[in-house]
Amino acid sequence: MKLRRRYFLQLAAGAAALPAVAHTAEAQSYPSRPVHIIVGYAAGGPTDILARLIGQWLSERLGQPFVIEDRPGAATNVATEAVAHAPPDGYTLLAAVSTNTINPALYPNLNFNFIRDIAMIAGLTRSAEVLEVNPALPIRSVSELIAYVKTNPGKLSLASFGTGTISHVAGVMFKKEAGIEMVHVPYRGSAPLVVDLLAGQVAAAFDNIQSSIGYIKAGKLRALAVTSATRLPWLPDVPALADFLPGYEVTGWIGVAAPKNTPVPIIDKLNKEINAGLADPQIAARVADMASTVFIASPADLDKLVIEQTAKWSKVVEEAGIKGE
């Protein structure tokens, strides 16, 4: 009887180990065909450029094409839903962005839940926004802007590159913490925002540094502060907003994700290869050219970040009464 019981226990243990063995073997042969990275923005933007940069690296390292598919629409929700409902086999990936942590509060009826349906794989970059004004204004610092707005409430506009974007919530947090009111003017992207800011059609804006840095250095826009916790090497003379509003910090991020239940060995393999790419001097230099920093992180670190930021932005969106378009 003891021998028979031991035999059955050995069979049970062997059966339990089969899925893990299968996943490990699958990861060793992965990828065996082209992998698709879905991007929620149009071609030529920062997310598309970074996806292509890391896709080329992965293609060279893993021996299969990593094909970039741009599926813009609905504030990245079109692309995210496609990946959330794809087979969890590692062959459909998502260029995840910080917007994914804002959207749940803006769009409560989505056909997916980012935290439940998406598994983070690796980071790519982190970047800050810049608070800037048209230089025709008699404002040269954050303190002067706050004082001017308090003296002239509701008269100055504050632009963002879209309702519910990181640019918008950065402005919402700024106005709340500074105790001021400014008229929000949303644009459909950074390019038209910059055009109107240069023309004086709007007074101030939160924009991504990459889009504005050339105009700032040329003196056509005046940078008042960056939204990172400390100063940045691309604008070393521009203070952090936290210098004026302690604790203020808003940074966006871009990463790579997959459908939930993608085998852990595949996720770990991709994480290792992507992090190796981010450590490559040529890729790091390209990232720096985009006024961003490489973002090396583990899947667990990224899952924690997503949960924390989803809670943070949910509170901001709810308190400000922001609605998705």
Image (cartoon, rainbow, N blue to C red):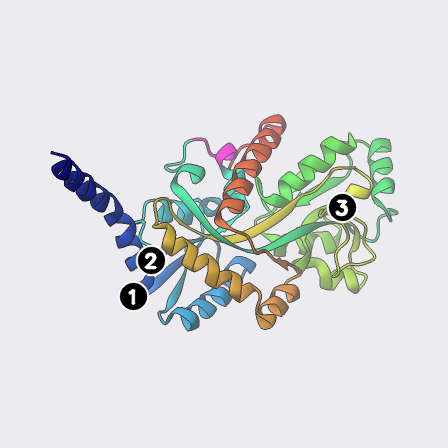
Label 3 close to label 2 by CB (< 8 Å): no
The residue under label 3 is 203
Q: Residue 33 shows which numbered tag?
A: 1
User: Is any part of residue 93 visible from this angle?
Assistant: no
Q: Looking at the picture, which amino acid does disc 2 mark?
A: Tyr
Which one is earlier in the sequence, the residue at label 1 or at label 2? 1
Q: CA distance from mark 1 to mark 3?
A: 51 Å
Q: Residue 91 shows which numbered tag?
A: 2
Q: Count residues near mark 1 (Cα–Cα under 10 Å), then give few for <14, some for 14-19, many for 20+.
A: few
Q: Secondary structure at mark 2?
A: loop
Taking depth in this image into account, of 31 and 68 the one nearest to the observer is: 31
The structure residue drawn at horizontal position 58% and vertical position 43%, both measured from the top left corner, is 165
Mark in front: 3 vs 2: 2
Q: Looking at the picture, which amino acid does disc 3 mark?
A: Ala
Taking depth in this image into account, of 22 and 67 the one nearest to the observer is: 22
The magenta stretch is 104-108
Q: CA distance from mark 1 to mark 2?
A: 8 Å
Q: Does 106 lie within the magenta span?
A: yes
Taking depth in this image into account, of 115 and 174 the one nearest to the observer is: 115
Which one is earlier in the sequence, the residue at label 3 or at label 2? 2
Label 1 close to label 2 by CB (< 8 Å): yes
